[in-house]
Each structure stands twice: as C-alpha cells, then as structure tokens.
Amino acid sequence: SLVNVTVDDTFGNSEENLQITYQPDGSWSQGVDCTNCEAHLDTTKVHSGTWHDTTYFSDNPPSSPLSASLTFNGVAIYVYCIVTRASTDPFGNSDMTFYLDGDQVGTFVQPPNGDPTYQYSVPVYVNEAIPSGKHTFTLVNGRAGGQTALALLDYIVFS
C-alpha cells in the first residue's frame, strides 16, 4: 500500500533523510527569517511554521533558473505553495514551471487580480501517474521574458 511522505520546505523529512535543494545559492529565503521579503505570512497556517520565498525579477533576471528540487522514490507527487494575487507588496504573479526527470510536466500561472489575501496549502502541481521508481522533481519560478513572479514553497508530499 502507498504511504504519503511529507517533505517540509525547511526541515525536510528526517525519517527518509530527504531535503529540498534550492538553486542558485542565496536566491531563496527562509520566509520566517527574511527581513527584506514582502510576503508576511501567518505562521500558524503554513506547514511546520516555515516556507521558502523567491522572486524572479523581470528587469534583473537571474543567470540560472530559480529552482527547488526534490529527489524521491514514488508514484505520485503533490506540491503545495502559498499564493497571493496582490497587485503590490508583494506582486502576486505566479509563474511556475514543473519538471520531472528533466522533462517539463506542468505549469501554474495565475496573474494578480488585486486580492491581497494569502491562500495556504494550494496544490500547484499534482501528478498521480508517475512510473514507480526514483525521480527528481524541480519547480522553477519565473521564465525568461516573463513578468516578475513570486513563489512561496511550503511542502511537498509524495507516495
């Protein structure tokens, strides 16, 4: 039978000895400790009270993709983010692309509409049809030529 394994953005999963890796170095901030981040969340509504924050700036794009990756052994994956549609502070444009074993498998695109509230535990990517085995999942925030984009990663579940 399948068992769900939760991997926190910060604490990972100690039983499976798994951690999410963030690239490039310094491009993602631990949300709780981030003093210059515009997103200020209710820590009681996020998994383990933590999240990771990154912004893709269209006027100053990074030299390499802003990515969060997890290698796991399973047949399904569920990726949960915090999402806002605010127009300013922060600019709540979501523009994420998802890869499995190097192949693009999905996107989550949601432009701002002026609603400044935060939605917690939003399943931005779900795939329940993965061939059994070891896989690498990668979330990339923003895209070349795209608008400024915010990503707030909370946790990943796989089975």
Image (tube, rainbow, N blue to C red):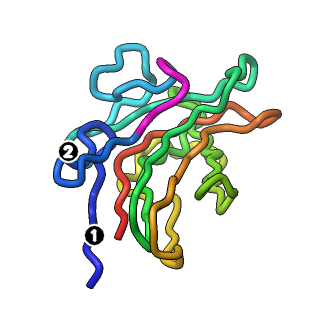
Where is residue 150, by image quadrant?
top right
Instruction: Give the quarter of the figure containing the C terminus.
Output: bottom left
Kind of residue at disc 1 = Asn
Where is residue 144, by image quadrant?
top right
Q: Residues within 10 Å of mark 1 (few under 14, many from 20)?
A: few
Residue 8, compared with residue 67, is above or below; it is: below
> Residue 58 in magenta?
no
Place of residue 75 in the rendered image (x, y in percent of width and height, measured from the top left): 44, 73
Dot placed on the residue nearer the N-terminal end, 1 or 2: 1
Residue 114, compared with residue 15, is above or below; it is: above
**Can residue 46 be spotted in the picture?**
no
Instruction: Give the quarter of the figure containing the N terminus.
Output: bottom left
Residue found at x 65% / y 61%: 106
Place of residue 23 in the rendered image (x, y in percent of width and height, measured from the top left): 52, 29
Place of residue 90 in the rendered image (x, y in percent of width and height, measured from the top left): 52, 29
Q: Which residue is mark 1?
A: 4
Q: Are marks 1 and 2 in contact (CB under 8 Å)?
A: no
Place of residue 156 in the rendered image (x, y in percent of width and height, measured from the top left): 37, 55
3D distance between C-alphas at marks 1 and 2 = 17 Å
Kind of residue at disc 2 = Ser
Seen as rendered, the residue at the extreme right is 145
Name the element at disc 2: helix
Q: Which residues are magenta?
A: 21-26
Q: Which residue is mark 2?
A: 48
In the figure, is residue 59 to the left or right of 138? Answer: right
Compare residues 134 and 118 and report the one nearer the observer: 134
Where is residue 5, by image quadrant?
bottom left
Q: Check residue 85 in the rendering and tell me which mark sits there, or answer none.
A: none
